[in-house]
Image: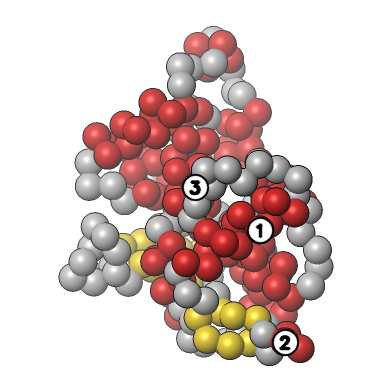
Amino acid sequence: MLARIIAALPSDLPAIRDRALLLVGFFCALRRSELVALAVEDLDRQSDGWNVTIQRSKTDPYGRGQYVPLPAFRGPLCPTAAVADWLAGGAIAEGPLFRVVGSNCKIGSAIPAPQVGQILRNRTGQAGLNVQHLSAHSLRSGFAVSATRAGIAAAQIQAVTRHRSIGGLAPYVRTAGPPSKAQLLGLPSNNALALDSHQSKLT
């Protein structure tokens, strides 16, 4: 579903921002408050994948800092390439990462948290997909469900979602449903192949 949303995006600056926003939100399994709080300074850019610092979160209320990988791989769903395109297109070198794009493509302040869900629903509708029940949390839950379906170990998923316990992932495991025939036979599914390029970075 996310691939179809990304494929339907135009090439203007707001769409370049939204591509980066949606892919970072998904692959880092971020809450909307974490996503809009990201700054350029929170990105540690490496050649084989970036590291993202979450300065403060629900599971880190005192701001000790949490770290999640942002994978780099080939194809239109690469989140690091999407972020690089947005930074270049918006001429952003410091400060808030995801910002309002005003008239005449003027870059403004950080986008407000409620806008994340609106962006997801708008872009989903433009792709001709059902927007019912979609919210900003769908990016975070979508990662957990997709990773579970791909056969990635719960502890590896937890390293990205930053749940306090494995038990916190239980709702997503239930949503993912029973294992597929391919998983039972030990064969890679399409989802597993899609995630294989960054599975090793989840440890």
First reached walking from the N terminus: tag 1 or tag 3: 1
In front here: 180 or 47? 180
Tell me which amino acid carries mark 3. Ser
As drawn, the label of residue 122 is 1
Above or below residue 189? Residue 163 is: below
Q: Secondary structure at mark 1?
A: helix
Left or right of 103 in this view: 146: left
Instruction: Measure the C-alpha gap from mark 2 to mark 1.
Output: 18 Å
Disc 2: which residue: 103
Residue drawn at 45 percent across, 51 percent down? 137
Return the x and y of residue 75 as percentages of the image width and height. Answer: 73, 51
Above or below residue 109? Residue 98 is: above
Return the x and y of residue 174 as percentages of the image width and height. Answer: 39, 26
Left or right of 122 in this view: 113: left
Instruction: Measure the C-alpha gap from mark 2 to mark 3.
Output: 29 Å
Residue drawn at 24 percent across, 57 percent down? 59
Callout 2 touching callout 3 (CB < 8 Å): no
The residue mark sitting in front, 1 or 3, is 1
First reached walking from the N terminus: tag 2 or tag 3: 2
Instruction: Measure the C-alpha gap from mark 1 to mark 3.
Output: 14 Å
Quarter of the figure with the C terminus: top left
Local crowd at mark 2 within 10 Å, few (<14), some, or many (≥20)?
Answer: few
As drawn, the label of residue 138 is 3
Residue drawn at 23 percent across, 63 percent down? 60
Above or below residue 32? Residue 161 is: above
As drawn, the label of residue 17 is none
Q: How is the image coloured?
A: secondary structure
Return the x and y of residue 171 as percentages of the image width and height. Answer: 34, 33
First reached walking from the N terminus: tag 2 or tag 1: 2
Is residue 15 in view from this perspective?
yes
